[in-house]
Image (cartoon, grey):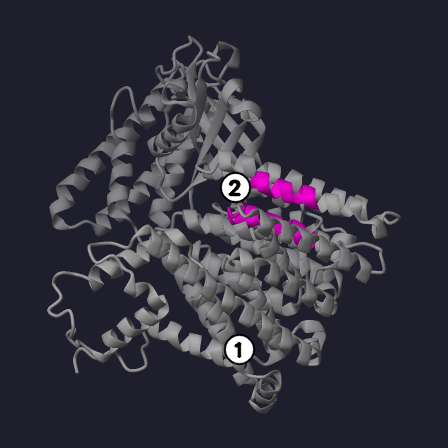
Amino acid sequence: MSNAPTAGRLGQYEIRGLLLCFLHIVRTLSDDTLLAYWSKVNPQDVMNFLSLLEICIVQFRYVGKRNISRSLEPWVSKLFSCERKSQTMPVLRSRGSLMQAKLQQFSTMDTSLTLNMAGGATEAEINHQSLLEGNMSTEACLTVLDVLSLFTQSFKIQLLDSDGHNALMTKVFDTYLTLLKVGPSETAIKHIFASLRAFIFKFQVPLFKGRVTLCGSLCYEVLKCCMSKLSVLRGEASALLYLLMRNNFDYTKRKSFLRMHLQIIIAVSQLIADVALTGSSRFQESLSIINNFANSDKAMKTTTFPSEVKGLTMRIRTVLMATAQMREHEKDPEMLLDLQYSLARSYASTPELRRTWLDSMARAHSKNGDFSEAAMCNVHVAALVAEYLHRRKLFPSGLAAFKKITQNIDEEGAMKEDAGMQDVYYTEDVLVEQLEVCVEGLWKAERFELITHISRLIIPVYEKRHEFEKLRRLYDTLQRAYAKILEVMHSGRRLLGTYFRVAFYGQGFFEEEDGKEYIYKEPKLTSLPEISLRLLSLYEEKFGAENVKIIQDSNRVNQKELDPKFAYIQVTFVKPYFDEKELAERKTDFEKCHNIQRFVFETPFTLTGKKQGGVEEQCKRRTILTTANTFPYVKKRIQVVGEKHLELKPIDVAIDEMKERSAELTKLCTNSEVNMITLQLKLQGCVSVQVNAGPMAYARAFLDESKSGQSSKKVKELKEIFRQFVNACSMALDINERLIKEDQYEYHEGLKANFKSMVKELSDIIHEQIEF
């Protein structure tokens, strides 16, 4: 019994055998008998019957001669292996294996009589088996088409219920689409497309008036057929696409074929986004066939139809141009997403097209592990749907509800009240579903603070519908989100990204990117060497290792001094920049990492031309960069659109440095949980008595009136900062003394002695006793 197959489990050959029996019965039954059966059984059994037809299409699809050869040879060698114990009575291992062997013989019919006993199958045997498989696939396909034709004719009223928006129509339609998806045999192609033409004439309301789902799915699959290597399939697909456009035009009383126009563009965009648009030359040929149909259609000569078809094909060709660029940059994630976003932006006035590209970008970001950017794509889609519903007074709030989540959201207000809006069927359900996707995405991105803003939009809908279980789950998510916020605020271990300025130089290599600067958002704690190596490897593969150079410093680049034979990349670490007003408003670490648009980096220099010098001559150039959008965004990199330079004199550098040290110490001391190691390291750096470094070097250079020639205002400001600094050091020492263990007492006394020496020297320099 141990070798017996699991109850209820059927092998592949058993399944095919049973399906053959089913198809044979269906084919031999009279139409009246089938109609009586469908009328008698319950609706679910009718759905199951249609599902069986779909399974038959998949199971008996023609897989091609090469695959048949591969699957045939192992079986032949096993069947005629010299290890068989008997040529007359094979060992009965189990009922299942015997059934499989019998069904295998049944499915290959008489080929088992002509197989080559010495080894693998011969060419003749493979050809014969391929012919049998092809005939079987065609026969199964024709049987299914006959049954579907009878069914759609007999149940037309049920199929047209709710303008075709019903489960029965969906099932019948999916079965027709499966026939296109499985790659039918050449013999079956003509019959499939004839059946689809009949379906289009019979069911114009679901295709051209009901929801866009059926029309959109059909366009997608037919367009895929327009790229086929089989010329007969391309020809039939082109003719069917033309027929759809013509019927849509006639359905609107020859005003336009708006639905087909939009759904074809959306389908082309999806094919590009899914990287399923291959064989563009074959696709261009199919477009030419459609144009020829329109120009030679005598009944349409006096209408706007031919010019509208020409306009559509031209628009498709424009979209196709992006495909070539995407292939060129398929290994460059930033450039690839830039191209996808440029397409999304070009369709800003057409919601469905923009949504197609934003959804595609969200999938790409998730695949790359860039969850903040994926979440922003989902938020933009939700805002697009909300704005659409708000304009139709179907939802209380539009874009305004999303402004606290991202300042970039105004982009979704570009939709126009024109043709692009007429064929959109967004509902409250669509919005709620998208908002649920946003909650999930923001959780993955660790941006827990934003979940509450999304929840405020979902909760009223759930309450109105009395969906209490969904409310319970949502409030549970909110509770966990707030717990996470407390946890990361306490631990300080959430890292929401690191930023770098990346500039490209070299017209011959970067073309329109030459001279452009971007801010790149990299994950977690990405180091400068890591991103430099990634970009170097990427562009070395693109341009050749000998042609790419990394500029190591952050100084201004004079492009005239660069060798045009090389591609140059300059990478600089930058930090988010806030002025005093912004710092007062952004109190938490999250607020300092979200909706940020300005970044800063500093370059040391001296008036003598050297990069580094003593504290009396050390200057700094502070560069503040402004990006076109705020981070996080739907893209990982944003172009720099503004640049401001501030040059700090040596005393300004001292003021800046001492302010930063004082602020760091104060923050460490006021944390709810003091990090002892960090505190001691900072203290040691602050109270050291080195001659040429540290705080005292600034005091000796700028606070000693006998040496300093600085303005009294700046000296006064620096003195005040030093007083604050001494107080911060004193507070840090008190905390350290309270928390240290016995083995660190001597270390603490050393810090204390250094601190007292520092305060004494500082008092002597400024000629006043500093209290602490």
* Type of secondary structure dominating the magenta stretch: helix
Which of labels 1 and 2 is toward the front?
1
Q: What is the x, y in percent for residue 75? A: 26, 61
Q: Which image quadrant for residue 667?
A: top left
Quick check: 498 above or below 540?
below
Residue 412 seen in this snapshot: yes
Q: What is the x, y in percent for residue 653? A: 43, 24
Which corner quadrant holds the N terminus? Answer: bottom left
Q: Secondary structure at mark 1?
A: helix
Which residue is rendered at x = 23% and y = 80% of the image? 95
The residue type indicated by label 2 comes to Leu
Segment colored magenta: 262-289
The residue type indicated by label 1 comes to Arg
- In magenta segment, residue 622: no
Q: Is residue 531 left or right of residue 276?
A: left
Residue 351 seen in this snapshot: no
Q: Are marks 1 and 2 in contact (CB under 8 Å)?
A: no
Q: Which residue is mark 2?
A: 337
Quick check: 273 above or below 142?
above
Query: Which of the pair 641/255 is nearer the observer?
Result: 255
Quick check: 133 above or below 17?
above
Q: Which residue is mark 1?
A: 27
Query: What label does residue 391 carry, if any?
Result: none
Query: Which of the pair 401/680 is nearer the observer?
Result: 401
Which residue extends farthest top?
608
